[in-house]
Image (spheres, helix red, strand yellow):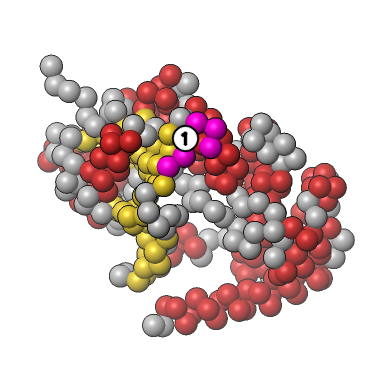
Amino acid sequence: MKEKPKVSVIVPCYDVERYLNRCLNSLVNQTLKDIEIILVDDGSPDRVPEKCDEWAKKDSRIKVIHKKNAGLGYARNTGLDVAIGEYVAFVDSDDYVEFNMYEKLYKVAKNHDSDVVYCGFKKEFKHNYFINVQECNDYTEFTNETVKNLIPDFITSEPYRKSEYKYEMSVWHSIYRRLIIQEHHLRFISEREYASEDIPFQIDFLSFAYRVSFIPDMLYIYCFNEESLTKAFPLERYYKIRNLFYLIQEKSKSYDTKGLRAKRLFIGYVRSYLRKWVRCREKSEAKKVICEIMNDEVWIEIRKIYHLSFLPFHQRLLLKAIYYRNVDMYYLLTKCMDYKMVSKIKKMFNK
């Protein structure tokens, strides 16, 4: 009887025809040969369905599932339903990985009996221009109760910390023990209802994990898609952010009793969302959206607990504008900060 694969790699595929070959080349050429690659065609409108089938004919380790479009979270769930590997990994199909990624992660998992292993990653802003992200300098391990203390850091940073995030909450730079996922029937929520499907999954998994490992090796390459960066988000995105806030606050109440991490996450998501609106919309329309968000009653709850002093200076100014419902102040501050950010990005791309 053939042994189960060491790692099941789940790859949701939607509208990524131009990137799919790059992603799959990095997976089929892994130095860890004993893997299965599960391609979930999420009703993609381009040639992705055909390309998935073509790849499956070339490599027997590839499974293809064609399904009606339901979004990234549910596509991952479809992959989990059929995965049989000892560990499970998730790859976004417009990204790619180093050829030795899963061999390194699996060796660490087996050597330390880890339930999940996280690695560093690279952000590719343009071809061959990377920013390296490491969450540790050496092998780092959390066990038992220290894992529970780790959970809030996967949401966002504590008050007074300048950096907004301590750990990357995305699931793509890691492998997870499938037995935990199976026994507790862990699944992803829909990004069509919530602003992030990854953070709730991380909280759920870490709640049952005993040993968590980090390695500094940068093995995953996260690619910025220029097309997605230029799209303006519809207003309904804000309500997905709010839904996520309440969900995270409920899920993490045992680890963060006052919900400070969930509140900072919400504040940060809203700030990022409004920056995109100010950048992409006419002044009058942007101000209208800012006003609607400022008048949401959720801020009454947040203001009672989340003090302005908890945040770095520039973030504090923006939150103050929200607390005092000063639309003009918020718009002007965002415009000024966005100008500085755009200038910084232009310099980076012109290197």
Q: Quadrant of residue 118?
A: top left
Left or right, 312 with respect to 280, comes to right
* Circle 1 residue: 143
**Residue visible at 43% across and 54% down in the picture:** 136
Rendered view: 149 above or below 186: below
Q: In terms of depth relative to the viewer, which is nearer, 46 or 94?
A: 94
Within 10 Å of disc 1 (Cα), the crowding (few <14, some 14-19, many 20+) is some
**Is disc 1 placed on a helix, strand or loop?**
strand
Rendered view: 86 above or below 106: above
* Screen quadrant of the C terminus: bottom left
Q: Position of residue 287 (x, y in %)?
A: 76, 65
Asked whether 142 falls inside the magenta stretch, the response is yes
Q: Quadrant of residue 226?
A: bottom left
Left or right, 303 with respect to 338, comes to right
* Screen quadrant of the N terminus: top left
Amino acid under disc 1: Thr
Asked whether 254 falls inside the magenta stretch, the response is no
**Residue visible at 81% across and 71% down in the picture:** 329
Left or right, 50 with respect to 176, comes to left
**Residue visible at 48% across and 80% down in the picture:** 346
Q: Which residues are magenta?
A: 141-146
Rendered view: 177 above or below 334: above
Q: Is residue 222 among the parts visible in the rendering?
A: no
Q: Position of residue 262 (x, y in %)?
A: 67, 44
**Residue visible at 37% across and 49% down in the picture:** 139
Residue that protrudes farthest toward the right in the picture: 324
Q: Quadrant of residue 130?
A: bottom left
Q: Position of residue 175 (x, y in %)?
A: 35, 39
